[in-house]
Image (cartoon, coloured by chain):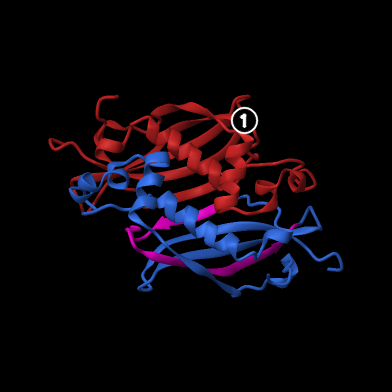
Chain colours: A red, B blue
Amino acid sequence: MRPVRYFDDYVVGDRFVTDSVTVTEGMILQFGRGFDTQLFHTNVDAATDSNFGGLIGSGLQTLNLSFALFFRMELVQPVALGSPGLDNVRWVQPLRPDDTIHVVCEVREVRPSRSKPDRGMIIMRHDTFRHDETRIMTFDCMHLLRRRQDA
Amino acid sequence: MRPVRYFDDYVVGDRFVTDSVTVTEGMILQFGRGFDTQLFHTNVDAATDSNFGGLIGSGLQTLNLSFALFFRMELVQPVALGSPGLDNVRWVQPLRPDDTIHVVCEVREVRPSRSKPDRGMIIMRHDTFRHDETRIMTFDCMHLLRRRQDA
Protein backbone atom coordinates (compact mmCIF):
# COMPACT_ATOMS: atom_id res chain seq x y z
CA MET A 1 0.00 0.00 0.00
CA ARG A 2 1.27 3.45 -0.91
CA PRO A 3 1.94 6.12 1.74
CA VAL A 4 -1.09 8.35 2.35
CA ARG A 5 -1.26 11.25 -0.10
CA TYR A 6 -3.26 14.22 1.09
CA PHE A 7 -4.68 16.96 -1.13
CA ASP A 8 -1.52 18.99 -0.45
CA ASP A 9 0.66 16.26 -1.96
CA TYR A 10 -0.77 16.51 -5.48
CA VAL A 11 0.58 18.81 -8.15
CA VAL A 12 -0.61 19.36 -11.69
CA GLY A 13 1.01 16.80 -13.95
CA ASP A 14 1.26 13.97 -11.40
CA ARG A 15 0.60 10.70 -13.23
CA PHE A 16 -0.52 7.31 -11.94
CA VAL A 17 -0.88 4.14 -14.01
CA THR A 18 -3.23 1.35 -12.93
CA ASP A 19 -2.94 -2.40 -13.29
CA SER A 20 -4.82 -3.94 -16.19
CA VAL A 21 -7.85 -6.17 -16.57
CA THR A 22 -8.89 -8.44 -19.44
CA VAL A 23 -12.52 -8.32 -20.49
CA THR A 24 -14.25 -11.54 -21.59
CA GLU A 25 -17.29 -12.03 -23.80
CA GLY A 26 -19.09 -13.38 -20.74
CA MET A 27 -18.36 -10.22 -18.73
CA ILE A 28 -19.72 -8.06 -21.56
CA LEU A 29 -22.92 -10.11 -21.93
CA GLN A 30 -23.51 -10.24 -18.17
CA PHE A 31 -23.10 -6.50 -17.72
CA GLY A 32 -25.26 -5.67 -20.73
CA ARG A 33 -28.10 -7.89 -19.58
CA GLY A 34 -28.04 -6.23 -16.17
CA PHE A 35 -27.54 -2.59 -17.04
CA ASP A 36 -27.50 -1.76 -20.75
CA THR A 37 -29.77 -3.99 -22.81
CA GLN A 38 -28.89 -2.63 -26.23
CA LEU A 39 -28.50 -5.61 -28.59
CA PHE A 40 -24.85 -4.90 -29.43
CA HIS A 41 -24.10 -5.49 -25.71
CA THR A 42 -26.34 -8.52 -25.10
CA ASN A 43 -26.57 -10.67 -28.25
CA VAL A 44 -23.56 -11.83 -30.28
CA ASP A 45 -25.50 -12.48 -33.50
CA ALA A 46 -27.39 -9.18 -33.40
CA ALA A 47 -24.14 -7.37 -32.55
CA THR A 48 -22.47 -8.88 -35.62
CA ASP A 49 -25.22 -7.39 -37.77
CA SER A 50 -25.03 -3.98 -36.01
CA ASN A 51 -23.03 -0.90 -36.94
CA PHE A 52 -20.30 -2.17 -34.59
CA GLY A 53 -19.80 -5.46 -36.49
CA GLY A 54 -19.55 -7.51 -33.30
CA LEU A 55 -20.21 -7.58 -29.59
CA ILE A 56 -19.04 -4.49 -27.70
CA GLY A 57 -19.10 -3.68 -24.00
CA SER A 58 -21.40 -0.97 -22.70
CA GLY A 59 -19.57 2.33 -22.30
CA LEU A 60 -20.80 2.22 -18.75
CA GLN A 61 -18.90 -1.03 -18.25
CA THR A 62 -15.69 0.61 -19.52
CA LEU A 63 -16.30 3.40 -17.01
CA ASN A 64 -16.94 0.93 -14.17
CA LEU A 65 -13.80 -1.05 -14.96
CA SER A 66 -11.75 2.13 -15.24
CA PHE A 67 -12.90 3.24 -11.79
CA ALA A 68 -12.34 -0.23 -10.35
CA LEU A 69 -8.74 -0.17 -11.61
CA PHE A 70 -8.29 3.33 -10.20
CA PHE A 71 -9.62 2.45 -6.74
CA ARG A 72 -7.58 -0.78 -6.64
CA MET A 73 -4.47 1.43 -6.67
CA GLU A 74 -5.49 2.49 -3.12
CA LEU A 75 -4.37 5.99 -4.03
CA VAL A 76 -7.12 8.25 -2.68
CA GLN A 77 -9.12 6.05 -0.31
CA PRO A 78 -7.69 7.06 3.08
CA VAL A 79 -8.42 10.77 2.50
CA ALA A 80 -11.20 10.72 -0.10
CA LEU A 81 -14.40 12.61 0.79
CA GLY A 82 -16.37 11.64 -2.31
CA SER A 83 -16.69 13.11 -5.76
CA PRO A 84 -18.96 15.93 -6.93
CA GLY A 85 -18.97 14.53 -10.45
CA LEU A 86 -17.45 13.88 -13.86
CA ASP A 87 -16.98 15.98 -16.97
CA ASN A 88 -16.05 15.27 -20.57
CA VAL A 89 -16.87 11.57 -20.47
CA ARG A 90 -16.11 10.28 -23.98
CA TRP A 91 -16.21 6.80 -25.44
CA VAL A 92 -13.64 6.97 -28.21
CA GLN A 93 -13.44 3.32 -29.25
CA PRO A 94 -15.63 0.36 -28.33
CA LEU A 95 -14.59 -2.19 -25.72
CA ARG A 96 -14.45 -5.66 -27.29
CA PRO A 97 -14.09 -9.20 -25.92
CA ASP A 98 -10.49 -10.11 -24.95
CA ASP A 99 -9.41 -6.47 -24.72
CA THR A 100 -6.96 -5.85 -21.88
CA ILE A 101 -7.31 -2.32 -20.54
CA HIS A 102 -5.50 -0.04 -18.10
CA VAL A 103 -5.92 3.58 -17.06
CA VAL A 104 -3.51 6.50 -16.96
CA CYS A 105 -4.58 9.14 -14.41
CA GLU A 106 -3.14 12.65 -14.57
CA VAL A 107 -3.78 15.57 -12.22
CA ARG A 108 -5.10 18.54 -14.22
CA GLU A 109 -6.12 21.01 -11.48
CA VAL A 110 -5.71 21.39 -7.71
CA ARG A 111 -8.19 23.66 -5.92
CA PRO A 112 -8.14 24.26 -2.16
CA SER A 113 -11.67 24.71 -0.79
CA ARG A 114 -12.60 28.32 -0.06
CA SER A 115 -15.26 27.45 2.50
CA LYS A 116 -13.81 24.32 4.17
CA PRO A 117 -10.13 24.56 5.15
CA ASP A 118 -9.85 20.81 5.83
CA ARG A 119 -10.22 19.80 2.17
CA GLY A 120 -9.51 20.51 -1.46
CA MET A 121 -10.49 19.22 -4.85
CA ILE A 122 -8.27 17.72 -7.52
CA ILE A 123 -9.45 17.26 -11.07
CA MET A 124 -7.95 14.15 -12.57
CA ARG A 125 -8.01 13.12 -16.22
CA HIS A 126 -8.55 9.37 -16.56
CA ASP A 127 -7.58 7.91 -19.95
CA THR A 128 -8.39 4.24 -20.55
CA PHE A 129 -6.14 2.40 -23.00
CA ARG A 130 -6.36 -0.93 -24.76
CA HIS A 131 -3.35 -3.30 -24.82
CA ASP A 132 -2.31 -1.90 -28.22
CA GLU A 133 -2.14 1.61 -26.61
CA THR A 134 -5.27 2.83 -28.41
CA ARG A 135 -7.19 5.16 -26.11
CA ILE A 136 -10.75 3.89 -25.82
CA MET A 137 -12.19 6.23 -23.19
CA THR A 138 -11.46 9.46 -21.35
CA PHE A 139 -13.10 11.34 -18.48
CA ASP A 140 -12.30 14.03 -15.91
CA CYS A 141 -13.18 13.21 -12.31
CA MET A 142 -13.36 15.64 -9.39
CA HIS A 143 -11.93 14.09 -6.22
CA LEU A 144 -12.52 15.79 -2.86
CA LEU A 145 -9.57 15.04 -0.58
CA ARG A 146 -8.59 15.88 3.00
CA ARG A 147 -5.73 18.32 3.58
CA ARG A 148 -2.81 17.66 5.89
CA GLN A 149 -3.67 18.90 9.38
CA ASP A 150 -0.48 20.93 9.44
CA ALA A 151 -1.14 22.54 6.07
CA MET B 1 -43.18 -2.16 -25.90
CA ARG B 2 -43.46 1.39 -27.23
CA PRO B 3 -43.64 2.12 -30.97
CA VAL B 4 -40.19 2.74 -32.49
CA ARG B 5 -39.09 6.37 -32.11
CA TYR B 6 -36.51 7.51 -34.63
CA PHE B 7 -34.26 10.55 -34.26
CA ASP B 8 -36.85 12.55 -36.23
CA ASP B 9 -39.53 11.82 -33.61
CA TYR B 10 -37.80 13.67 -30.76
CA VAL B 11 -38.31 17.33 -30.01
CA VAL B 12 -36.73 19.46 -27.33
CA GLY B 13 -38.76 19.17 -24.15
CA ASP B 14 -39.92 15.56 -24.64
CA ARG B 15 -39.95 13.89 -21.21
CA PHE B 16 -39.84 10.22 -20.25
CA VAL B 17 -40.14 8.84 -16.73
CA THR B 18 -38.66 5.45 -15.83
CA ASP B 19 -39.86 2.81 -13.42
CA SER B 20 -38.21 2.79 -10.00
CA VAL B 21 -35.81 0.49 -8.18
CA THR B 22 -35.16 0.10 -4.46
CA VAL B 23 -31.54 -0.12 -3.37
CA THR B 24 -30.59 -2.43 -0.50
CA GLU B 25 -27.62 -2.33 1.84
CA GLY B 26 -26.49 -5.60 0.25
CA MET B 27 -26.54 -4.10 -3.25
CA ILE B 28 -24.45 -1.15 -2.06
CA LEU B 29 -21.85 -3.33 -0.34
CA GLN B 30 -21.63 -5.75 -3.27
CA PHE B 31 -21.11 -2.98 -5.81
CA GLY B 32 -18.59 -1.14 -3.64
CA ARG B 33 -16.50 -4.26 -3.09
CA GLY B 34 -16.42 -4.90 -6.84
CA PHE B 35 -15.87 -1.44 -8.26
CA ASP B 36 -15.41 1.35 -5.69
CA THR B 37 -13.65 0.21 -2.56
CA GLN B 38 -13.86 3.45 -0.61
CA LEU B 39 -14.81 2.57 2.98
CA PHE B 40 -18.07 4.53 2.98
CA HIS B 41 -19.24 2.14 0.22
CA THR B 42 -17.91 -1.13 1.63
CA ASN B 43 -17.96 -1.07 5.45
CA VAL B 44 -21.01 -0.06 7.52
CA ASP B 45 -19.03 0.80 10.67
CA ALA B 46 -16.38 2.83 8.87
CA ALA B 47 -19.12 4.57 6.88
CA THR B 48 -20.88 5.58 10.11
CA ASP B 49 -17.67 7.27 11.24
CA SER B 50 -17.12 8.97 7.84
CA ASN B 51 -18.19 12.40 6.67
CA PHE B 52 -21.34 10.76 5.24
CA GLY B 53 -22.50 9.42 8.65
CA GLY B 54 -23.52 6.06 7.19
CA LEU B 55 -23.20 3.71 4.26
CA ILE B 56 -23.70 5.32 0.86
CA GLY B 57 -23.74 3.84 -2.62
CA SER B 58 -20.95 4.61 -5.05
CA GLY B 59 -21.92 7.42 -7.40
CA LEU B 60 -21.03 5.01 -10.14
CA GLN B 61 -23.73 2.67 -8.84
CA THR B 62 -26.29 5.47 -9.01
CA LEU B 63 -25.21 6.07 -12.60
CA ASN B 64 -25.45 2.36 -13.46
CA LEU B 65 -28.93 2.06 -11.95
CA SER B 66 -30.07 5.23 -13.70
CA PHE B 67 -28.96 3.83 -17.05
CA ALA B 68 -30.50 0.44 -16.30
CA LEU B 69 -33.86 2.13 -15.59
CA PHE B 70 -33.51 4.16 -18.79
CA PHE B 71 -32.73 1.16 -21.00
CA ARG B 72 -35.52 -0.90 -19.41
CA MET B 73 -37.96 1.63 -20.90
CA GLU B 74 -36.99 0.17 -24.31
CA LEU B 75 -37.10 3.71 -25.67
CA VAL B 76 -33.99 4.01 -27.83
CA GLN B 77 -32.82 0.42 -28.35
CA PRO B 78 -34.21 -0.34 -31.83
CA VAL B 79 -32.52 2.68 -33.40
CA ALA B 80 -29.63 3.43 -31.03
CA LEU B 81 -26.15 3.59 -32.57
CA GLY B 82 -24.23 4.11 -29.32
CA SER B 83 -23.28 7.14 -27.30
CA PRO B 84 -20.29 9.43 -27.79
CA GLY B 85 -20.36 10.36 -24.10
CA LEU B 86 -21.71 12.17 -21.06
CA ASP B 87 -21.37 15.70 -19.76
CA ASN B 88 -22.16 17.45 -16.49
CA VAL B 89 -22.31 14.28 -14.39
CA ARG B 90 -23.08 15.48 -10.85
CA TRP B 91 -23.75 13.57 -7.65
CA VAL B 92 -25.95 15.95 -5.71
CA GLN B 93 -27.01 13.74 -2.78
CA PRO B 94 -25.72 10.34 -1.67
CA LEU B 95 -27.57 7.11 -2.44
CA ARG B 96 -28.46 5.35 0.82
CA PRO B 97 -29.83 1.89 1.68
CA ASP B 98 -33.59 1.55 1.13
CA ASP B 99 -33.74 4.53 -1.23
CA THR B 100 -36.17 4.00 -4.10
CA ILE B 101 -35.05 5.89 -7.19
CA HIS B 102 -36.42 6.74 -10.61
CA VAL B 103 -35.17 8.86 -13.50
CA VAL B 104 -36.75 11.71 -15.45
CA CYS B 105 -35.26 12.03 -18.96
CA GLU B 106 -35.76 15.23 -20.94
CA VAL B 107 -34.58 16.01 -24.48
CA ARG B 108 -32.40 19.13 -24.43
CA GLU B 109 -31.01 19.24 -27.98
CA VAL B 110 -31.61 17.50 -31.32
CA ARG B 111 -28.79 17.63 -33.87
CA PRO B 112 -29.00 15.97 -37.30
CA SER B 113 -25.59 14.65 -38.38
CA ARG B 114 -23.86 16.83 -40.95
CA SER B 115 -21.73 14.03 -42.36
CA LYS B 116 -24.04 10.99 -42.05
CA PRO B 117 -27.60 11.53 -43.29
CA ASP B 118 -28.88 8.29 -41.73
CA ARG B 119 -28.48 9.50 -38.13
CA GLY B 120 -28.69 12.30 -35.62
CA MET B 121 -27.79 12.99 -32.01
CA ILE B 122 -30.10 13.88 -29.18
CA ILE B 123 -28.79 15.25 -25.92
CA MET B 124 -30.91 14.05 -23.05
CA ARG B 125 -30.81 15.32 -19.47
CA HIS B 126 -31.20 12.44 -17.01
CA ASP B 127 -32.24 13.48 -13.48
CA THR B 128 -32.34 10.76 -10.83
CA PHE B 129 -34.77 11.28 -7.96
CA ARG B 130 -35.28 9.63 -4.59
CA HIS B 131 -38.78 8.57 -3.46
CA ASP B 132 -39.14 11.89 -1.57
CA GLU B 133 -38.55 13.75 -4.87
CA THR B 134 -35.07 14.92 -3.86
CA ARG B 135 -32.82 14.96 -6.90
CA ILE B 136 -29.72 12.88 -6.15
CA MET B 137 -27.96 12.85 -9.51
CA THR B 138 -27.98 14.51 -12.91
CA PHE B 139 -26.16 13.93 -16.19
CA ASP B 140 -26.46 14.76 -19.89
CA CYS B 141 -26.11 11.85 -22.30
CA MET B 142 -25.56 12.02 -26.05
CA HIS B 143 -27.59 9.36 -27.87
CA LEU B 144 -26.87 8.63 -31.54
CA LEU B 145 -30.08 7.49 -33.22
CA ARG B 146 -31.11 6.38 -36.71
CA ARG B 147 -33.31 8.66 -38.80
CA ARG B 148 -36.46 7.55 -40.55
CA GLN B 149 -35.61 6.34 -44.05
CA ASP B 150 -38.19 8.69 -45.52
CA ALA B 151 -36.91 11.72 -43.58
Which is more toward the observer, A34 or A52?
A: A34
The magenta segment is B86-113
Rendering quarter of residue B118:
bottom right
Label 1: element kind: loop
Across and down, in percent, residue A41 comes to 65, 47
- Check disc 1: other Cα within 10 Å, few if <14, some if 14-19, many if 20+: some
Residue at x 49%, y 59% (from the top left corner)? B66
Q: In x, y percent, where is residue B26?
A: 36, 51
Residue A114 lies, in percent from the top left, at: 23, 52
* Relative horizontal placement of residue A64, taking residue B148 as reference (left or right): left
Q: Which residue is drawn at 85% across and 64% down?
A: B149
Q: Quadrant of the N terminus of chain A?
A: top left
Q: Is residue B87 magenta?
A: yes
In the image, residue A61 lies in the stretch drawn in magenta: no
A76 left or right, relative to B67: left
Identify the residue position indicated by label 1 in the image.
Answer: A99
Q: Nearer the viewer, residue B69 or B8?
A: B69
Q: Position of residue A9 (x, y in %)?
A: 27, 31
